Image: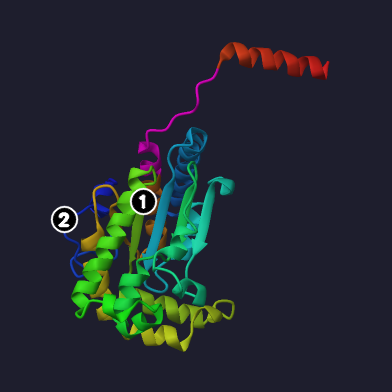
Amino acid sequence: MKFNSKQFRYDGHNKFSVAGTPTRIDPFYVDETDRAHQLDELATRMDQAQNRMHADEHYGLLVLFQAMDAGGKDSSIRHVFKGVNPSRFKMAAFTKPEKTDLKHDFLWRFWQELPERGYMGIFNRTYYEEVLTLRVHPDRLSQSNIPENLLPKDEKTLWKQRFGDIVHFEDYLFRNGFPIVKFYLHVSKEEQGKRLIARLSDTEKQWKLSESDLEERQHWPAYMRAYEDTINATATRQNPWYVIPSDDRPNQQLIIATILAEVLESLPTRFPETDPAKAKKLIKEIQKQDS
């Protein structure tokens, strides 16, 4: 199967449908050895492109991972970035907002974790929780302490406003040299169920699952509607969404790594120009020091 990243890309020209998008496709690898080899090659490409971006110091890249529980966020981050220089990317994982976070606007805590120029930032769960979880549980919005007179009377207007805030935020970052790659790891409810059961059967992973997580699973249809609307409202040419079939974890990781390698290589970065004469002079000085 020939790889074409456009088949996973949503940039506002095509509509995303949860029901119409597969959670499993034919693999891009023959066996585990082939997959590991491909991942190593992609990691090398990513590392080289990131090294150039780091030296250039004009661009940064923000990578977002969104998914339902057990969608494969942690494993994808662990495998996809294992060959990339860890000193040149910043990792942030987000859970429920703390008291300090709720004293600020809903994007505040995410601003704090943005990467610098030359670096790659990785968000495990993102500001999109503010239009996903809160949409499924709108009663939690009261915890944000937003003045009631500023809240729209109907929820449809509220989410439209928040979608607009997010798009403006992402456009702002793009115009300042920080494009964003957004991954939604599209896993089926059946596959998620198998993974949750596997967690409960593993004493080292049982801690990752609680009764509240299972309660959230009851809201699966509402979450799927929220994801569908969110992706369609915030997918843009500059900052597209990539919907990744995620029932096959090895294939999921390979797709993500390929897309990231392509994105990093597409950035118009270059190594600073060097002076060959100056380099030769410095070489001679080092050789004198060692003689």
Look at the image and say whether residue 264 sits in the magenta stretch.
Answer: yes
- The three-letter amino acid code for the residue at tag 1 is Ile
The segment highlighted magenta reads 261-274
- The three-letter amino acid code for the residue at tag 2 is Asn
Residue placed under numbered mark 1 in the picture: 180
Q: Is residue 174 visible?
A: yes
Q: Earlier in the sequence, mark 1 or mark 2?
A: 2
Q: CA distance from mark 1 to mark 2?
A: 19 Å
Secondary element at image label 2: loop
Nearer the observer, 285 or 148: 148
Nearer the observer, 183 or 277: 277
Measuring from the top left, give residue 225's x and y in whole percent: 23, 74
Measuring from the top left, give residue 229's x and y in whole percent: 21, 68
Q: Is residue 279 left or right of residue 112?
A: right
Q: Residue furthest right?
A: 291
> Residue 192 has which mark?
none
Q: Is residue 175 above or below residue 80?
A: above
| Quadrant in the picture for the C terminus | top right
Residue placed under numbered mark 2 in the picture: 14
Instruction: Classify mark 1: residues with Cα within 10 Å, few (<14), some (14-19) or many (20+).
Output: many
Instruction: Classify mark 2: residues with Cα within 10 Å, few (<14), some (14-19) or many (20+).
Output: few
Q: Is residue 73 left or right of residue 22?
A: right
At 52% across and 34% down in the image, what residue appears? Answer: 55
- Rendered image quadrant of residue 166: bottom left
Measuring from the top left, give residue 239's x and y in whole percent: 30, 51
Secondary element at image label 1: strand
At 52% across and 49% down in the image, what residue appears? Answer: 89
Nearer the observer, 73 or 41: 73
